[in-house]
Every structure is written in structure tokens, then in C-alpha cells.
Amino acid sequence: MTLLLPPNATIGLVGGGQLGRMSAMAAARLGYRCHILTRERDSPASQVAAAATISDYQEPEGLRRFAVAVDVISFEFENVSAEGLDLLASLKPVRPSPTILRISQDRVLEKTFLNQIGVPTAPWSQVEDCEALTTAAAKVGLPAVLKTTRLGYDGKGQITLRHRDEFGAAFAALSPKPLVLEGFIDFAQEISVVAARGEDGGYTAFDTVENRHCNHILDLTLAPARIPEPVDRQAQAIARKIADAMDLVGLLAVEMFVDRDGRVLVNEIAPRPHNSGHWTIDACPASQFEMHIRAIAGLPLPPAVRHSDAVMKNLVGPEETALWPAILAEPGLIPHLYGKVEARPGRKMGHITRLFPRGSLPGEFGVTAALGPAAPRATEP
Ligand code: AMP
């Protein structure tokens, strides 16, 4: 079905977090209204949107009330039940399609899909019980990472295993089952690509970026990634292959590892705006959020060009939120705060971006200096 959303139409966004907030801000600039479906009364997204439905994501009555009030439905959060997705899709166009959301909700479906289309991942095995864990470890080797198949994010729902005597406790600690065991990738770098694809197959992708995590939470994104040309080509080709194979209409983020031999392996995919694309708000004429809105609204997709190089740093938890006054006083830091009232440990509260002329992203010391009061967190061991 072709859909070209006219100005003043209403976009329904499932999820009330910062990704929904920044999508709603981009939508407003294009003359659209956003209606947010969220469980929270005062969510980051609903603070900047025209309307909100407060409901559980699985509750049919809430989903129905939301769907009837909007013209198209998209997501900043993909963990809606299969029945919920079917209900939404029976009432309004859902973009990206429920099939894509189902694949990205489940690590087993996701890895199976990726491997079937010839996209490499870490070696992996599904784990139903403790015995299967021993078999899986024999296949993928140790160390390995045991993960939940569903509902994991920011390192929640995963445990690194180094010895067999850790198996029982780790298996018991993670739920829901089944789990997935992945070979541990001794990566040289973590990178990602954010791409947009329209209903007509039009495609554009932002430059490959480098991501640094701390305690499994993204700390820094460097745009562009400092990677050899062949690695960049692999990463971009993988993103394109996945978007085309899924017949994506919307946005796709692909998180990848670069191993010590320069091979690119996919860690996970997300069919929505992504934290590693926040730099595009300040460094690109059309950000990932604008691309998201354009793709789901049926608008033309402009090339995802970058006018500047950028360093993006997340502001996580109470310690980094406390830096806010100092950040505001630092010339050249571009501040973004998400409107969350409580700065719990590990919670993403905002981010900052520093721009550089194209081609002049600084080296390690320069990156630290560029962030002023918000120094990078130590990278994990
Ligand atoms: P995930 O929740 O799967 O995105 O994992 C969060 C972070 O944990 C990744 O960005 C990596 O830093 C690390 N990680 C996850 N899986 C692996 C793996 N198989 N090998 C090495 N590091 C991993």
C-alpha cells in the first residue's frame, strides 16, 4: 500500500523514551503531529508530542484506542507482543512491518535470519536447558556470552562465561528461557550503520561509526569510524543486504564487531532509531530521526550526508547528569537532555555532541579534551 502522509497527519509512536522524543521533534519539524503509546504518565516522548495514550503495550483496549487516533504506526521500542502487533496492523499501517519487528525481538530468529541471508554473526547456539549449555559451549568455545533471546538491552540479560563451573548459576540467573550462547568475539572495534529504506526501495545509509561501551552501555560514538576501507565496505554492504532482504520500510541500525582479522560480524539489529545515530542530529542535514519519519511517512529520502565529523557522548546515571551545569558552560558542546525526572544508575539521561570540520576528527587525547567536563568512561576490560 502506498502511503504519502500529508502535513498535519498524526504519526503513532509506540514507546515513550528518548528515541520517541527525538523522532517526535523531527516529525514536528516536518509538520506532523505525534501520538505516543506509553506506560508512563510523564514520558520523554509525550512531553514533546501532541497526544499520548497511557497503556500497557499488551493491553488490547489501549492498543485499539491508540491505533484509531493515528494515521500510521511506528516504534521506538519493539517489544510489543505478537498479538498486539497483529491488532495494530489490523487497524492501521505499521512500519516497519510486524514481521521485521518479530525478527528483531528474538535473538534466535534474528541470528537465523542473518545467517540464512549470508550475514556472519558470532558462532551461536540455542540453549534450552543446562545440558544444552554444555553442548553449546563445546560448539562455540569459551569464553562465551550467555544471553536471553528476548527483552535484553544495554547488557541486561547477559553473562560472560569463562569456566564450566559458572554454567549452572548463569543459566539459573537469566530469564526468560530459552537462552542463546554466543562465542566471545575478541573484537578490535565495535561499529554500526544506520540506514533508511522507503517503500519504493529507495535506500540511504549514514557513515559507519565507531562505538565504545562501558558496562555494556554505549558511552561514545565517533563519526566516522576510523576503519580501513575494506571494513567500511563490508559494514555498509551488510546493512544494505539486511534492509533489502527484510523489505524494510523505516530505519535500521546494525551493530557489528570488527574482529582482529578485519572481518565484520553482526551483533544485533534494531529496526528503529539507535543511540549510535544521535550524532546525526547535529552533524547531518537530515538526522536519523528525520529519516525515520520520512521513511514511514512515504516522503523522499535525501542522501544521508554528513557535513561534520562528530563525537557523541551519552550522559548516564546520576554522576554524569550532575555535570549538566558544567556542560552548559562549555563552548561548542551541543547539549541534549531527555526530560527524565529520576537519574537512576545506568539510565540514559541525555547526550552531548561536539562537531569537527569533516576530516578532522581528533585522536584519542583530542576526543577526551573535546568532551570538556564529561570525560569518556573507562572502556571495559
Ligand atoms: P548486546 O546487548 O548484545 O548488544 O551486547 C552489549 C555489548 O556487550 C556489546 O556492545 C559488546 O560490547 C558486548 N558483547 C555482546 N556480545 C558479545 C560477544 N559475543 N562477544 C564480545 N562482546 C560481546
Image (cartoon, rainbow, N blue to C red):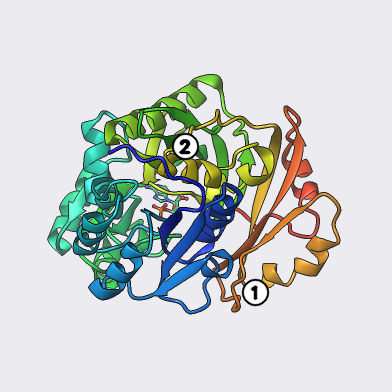
From the viewer's perspective, tell me whether residue 278 is left or right of residue 360. Answer: left
- Between 374 and 354, the residue placed more toward the observer is 354
What amino acid type should be assigned to the residue bearing mark 1?
Pro
Name the residue beneath numbered marker 2: 299
Which residue sits at x=50%, y=65%?
Answer: 17
Q: Secondary structure at mark 2?
A: loop
Name the residue rendered at 44%, 65% in the picture. 36
Q: Could you tell me residue 52's position as x and y percent?
A: 45, 70
Looking at the rendered image, the quarter that the N terminus falls into is top left
Q: Circle 1 is placed at which residue position?
A: 318
Asked if residue 179 can be seen in this view, the reply is: yes
Mark 2 or 1 closer to N-term?
2
State whether label 1 is within 8 Å of ligand 1.
no
Q: Residue at x 45, y 60 (%)?
A: 154
State the separation of the CA atoms marked 2 and 1.
39 Å
141 in relation to 175, above or below: above
Residue 144 image offset from top left, x and y in percent: 33, 51
Residue 14: x %, y % from top left? 39, 62
**Displayed quadrant of residue 290:** top right
> What residue is drawn where x is 33% and y is 33%?
242
Quadrant housing residue 25: bottom right
Give the camera-side residue of 169 and 199: 199
Relative height, residue 139 to residue 308 (above, below): below
Residue 369 screen position, x and y as percent: 80, 48
Residue 380 visible in the snapshot: no
**108 horizontally vs 153: left or right:** left
